[in-house]
Image (cartoon, helix red, strand yellow):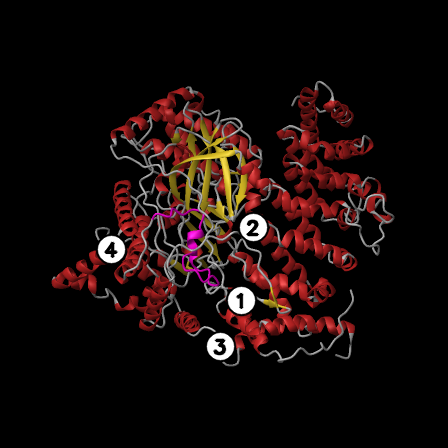
Amino acid sequence: MTGRPNTIDLAKQAKDHVYKLDGPGGPAKAEELAKVLNQMKLALQGVPEYESSPEQVYSLVTGLIEEDLLFLLAQNLHRLPFEARKDTQVIFSYVFRFRPPTASPKTDPVALSYVVNNRPEVLLELCRGYEHKESATPAGSVLREVLKSEAAAAIILYDDGEQPGSSLKGVTAIDRERPQTGNGVFWRFFDWIDKSSFEVAADAFTTFRELLTKHKELVPRYLAVNFELFFEKYNSILVQSNSYVTKRQSIKLLGEILLDRSNYNVMTAYVDRGEHLKICMNLLRSDRKMVQYEGFHVFKVFVANPHKSIAVQKILLMNRDKLLSFLSHFLEDRTDDEQFIDEREFLIKQIRNMPPNPVPPARHAQPV
Amino acid sequence: MADEAIAGHYQVLEELGLLCMSSFYMHESSVAYISLMIVGGSFGVVYKGIEKASGEVVAIKHVSRPYTIPYGATSSTTIDLESTDDDIQDIQAEISVLATCASSYVTQYKASFLRGSKLWIVMEYLGGGSCLDLLKPEPCSFGEPQIAIICRELLRGLEYLHAEGKIHRDIKAANVLLSETGKVKLADFGVAAQLTNIKSQRNTFVGTPFWMAPEVIQQSGYDFKADIWSLGITALEMANGEPPHASLHPMKALFHIPKNPPPRLEGNFSKEFKDFIAQCLMKDPERRPSAKELLRHRFIKSSGKIEALQELIERRRTYDATKTKKRNRPYYQETLQDFSPRDEQDEWVFDTVRSVVPRKATVKSRKPSSIFSTEEALRRMDLKDAPLQPTSPAPPTMRKSTVLRQPSGAQMSSTRSTRGQPPPAMRRPLQPDMSFGNSGSSQRLFRRVPSDGSNSGRASSPNPFDDVADENKHPNAVEVTSKEAILGRRLYSKALDPTLAELHAQTSSMAKREALAKLSDAFAALDAVDPEGVYHLFRNLNATMTQDSKLSNAFLNPLDPTAGPLDSEKPPGTVIIKSVPANPPLSPTKLVLAANNPHLKSHKRRQSAALVHSGPGSPEKATKQERDAEKVALQARYPGREAQPGMEHCKQLSDVLYSRWIDGLRLRWPGT
């Protein structure tokens, strides 16, 4: 680095290079773009010899917004050279965190607020980074940082293309009561997690979990409105996945979602279904013991429920003896997992003490 | 499946070497107490493979380590995810650290893919071996010019990593690999940590004791300067053949490093070299120079070309050639999943129509199931004899190579003590690792293929041999049918093998370690082909020893009554030290005893562990443990019976679950 980087037209230069990526000199342009992005990163980060000034950063952030570079970078992330992808990741996280020195720390960072209100496609394109092995990791880490913002999470959850009330028109245009069609970007995660290679799938899952566990108001409402679609996909694609990692992680996440206090309604609705119990009981018999173990933590919710639905009671009673003998030997080698042992004992007791015939639950099943 | 596609890109050629990555796991539960735990060995196999498209040779590592070591031991490798409770997210994070490194001074990560529950990691293949491999031939050290070259290349690697905000945390000769042309690369990011924020300091306890910087040991928080210290130790290792304190027990070294003045290079070396070491080994990390600064050191600036290192590789080749020992390179062989056919009766009944659990294609169990009942009978017999002792074979302990301490809250649940029949010991016989390449980091840590322990406890599976389903297995062991053979096998897997492993772990001299390793392999071979022989050997040995009064006094009577139940509670090989007071119990006398009698040594060690365990003011603890053990034993004995009356211990859980429901109900119906 020699001297001050000229931050004013970095954004413009980068934009020009991005547009030429498709042309005949594509690879050369990619290298030039990489150089510009590296300068941009240094301008944001500062270098030991030269601290970046807030004014300079501010003008760069504004430039990036004006030139729509955030969108272009998100869209072309997988085509950038190796180091440039890492630089882009750093640029995104700096830009999305940046607040002008005069702004109150409570306001949303400028670029983020611009994106959720005016350019939601940036976030959607970052999600689509999971389409490519090259962009999955950098896009994923940017996403997880951005998802700390509820508005950003809402953009991803409520994207529904051109449908009325889709987040495509900005966060304020979202209609939270309209069930999703299942064509939005959020629903693509199921495939990314199930069908990608380990690195991509595991990263996509981490983002997916973040999306579903972070916001205690947004998510329960979303799950309530989209209960059928969500759990149909969740059970058929993730819980029954052929990939060991996907299967195991998604059962664990299912347990976490159900046991989260904010998802009380979702849980009661979930554990009323006999179908769900069947899936879960089959997990207990999986040939992988960690799948059995994670399955157990979902199963316990059905059994501990003091208001079991008739359907659930029937299944449990029909299998009572089998369950009792099965559970008494279940994962016996977990001798040092006291909590597990206690819970297993508890479930055995619960099942043993069930009345011989199903009784209507004391409460009415709550429609969610 | 995308993973299948990736896996298809590689052709696994041959096994390169076996590496054991036994680890040594610590966590701090409070300031005053450190809980130590030596996790069972985790073992790895390195395969040489070919990337089909390019024809490029790659190293494919395949380790089924119990993933209780979030930042892993030596090689970043392949992981049997099934044997870990830990979050797969952590593993993914580790891999993504690997994947973001691209430097010619760092071994290049290629890809990773899943096969069943096993995660395979493909790395660049380096044919020259590790510096530790290259140190083996006489005179067991490198010349000063060669050390200077290696240090220069390492500093470049560190310069790259540190600029990327990464700390390696496990620099040592075993983790420095050479290509055939002499390129030097840092390997093993198993422990690399990403500093997302330069200011944030790490305080996880990671590394290998002898190479650890004082500030890492003291947990005062550390940064990339910790790698510089380890580099200094590695330079000493290359000059002297071993790191300072190598004769000490690694645990003891942990206490020496912060306490003593920093080691210095002594002997017939240049002033520049000595100064270089002194610079690296500044105890105050602030005063320790950075990689960038050290690259300007005179010792480094005057260093030569990497081609000079080829001599070291040649030396090693000659050394290998003189060794007549032939090595059979086992080729990779995929083992079929072997599930026992399930009893249809066992399926759940839903709506009176039988549900069939989706299941992969099954292969008939190839063992007569009658063995199971024999085993079962033996087990019961065993319980009757010792009702208070769980018969769990814990994973064998091997040399501790890498230590990790988590700041807090780490669970001790990592020893998955397995209940039940020992798996037929179908271990591959092991040789000292003679290979070059990435496997090299195994040199000092060699031995043994995946421990079966983690798989043997699949309680719900009725098939006692379902460890055959282990993708790592070589189905080459004989079938066990006679009672003697079963006992022999049991003797091997429960007593002999873990004892040898522990002994090996405690031995630091290379020659002794090799001798032990050979012995261990010999026993493994015997066990594989003739478990009955093992039985007869020890029966006769025992009988002979009884006839000699001195021997019988020394070996056949308990050495010390205080070693009593706690001692025998753990099978030899596992050392679990809970709540160790930070300093006193680890005094040298307790840990290092009569070196000439290894049995005594290991015995005493366990004993001291036991003493420590029930240490200051916690006899209650010991009794509680006994009670717990009793409970467990009882539960195992009477499966399915009524649990203790009252179920008081379950109250907490039911309270939690109920209160959650009630909370919800209250919101809705204030009357409830």
Residue located beneath label 1 in the image:
A339
Disc 1: host chain: A
Question: Which label is found at residue B643?
Answer: 3
Disc 2: host chain: A
Rendering coords of residue B73 (x, y %): 45, 45
Rendering coords of residue B446 (x, y %): 35, 42
B344 or B544: nearer the viewer:
B344
Total count of labels = 4
Q: Which of marks 1 and 4 is in front?
A: 4
Residue located beneath label 2 in the image:
A244
- Kind of residue at badge 2: Tyr
Distance from disc 1 to disc 3, alpha carbons, whole Å, reads 15 Å
Tags 3 and 2 on a common chain: no
Which residue occupies the extreme front position in the image? B353
Tags 1 and 3 on a common chain: no
Side (left or right) of A157 relative to B454: right
Helix or strand or loop: what does disc 1 sit on?
helix
Instruction: Report which quarter residue A309 is drawn in.
Output: bottom right
Q: Residues within 10 Å of mark 2 (few under 14, many from 20)?
A: many
Q: What stretch is highlighted in magenta?
A: B456-476
- Kind of residue at badge 3: Ala
Q: Residues within 10 Å of mark 1 (few under 14, many from 20)?
A: few
A102 lies above or below B635: above
B594 lies above or below B130: below
Residue located beneath label 4 in the image:
B534
Helix or strand or loop: what does disc 4 sit on?
helix
Tags 1 and 2 on a common chain: yes
B348 or A225: nearer the viewer:
B348
Quarter of the picture containing the N terminus of chain B is top right
Instruction: Report which quarter residue B626 is drawn in.
Output: bottom left
Distance from disc 3 to disc 2, alpha carbons, whole Å, reads 34 Å
Q: Residues within 10 Å of mark 4 (few under 14, many from 20)?
A: many
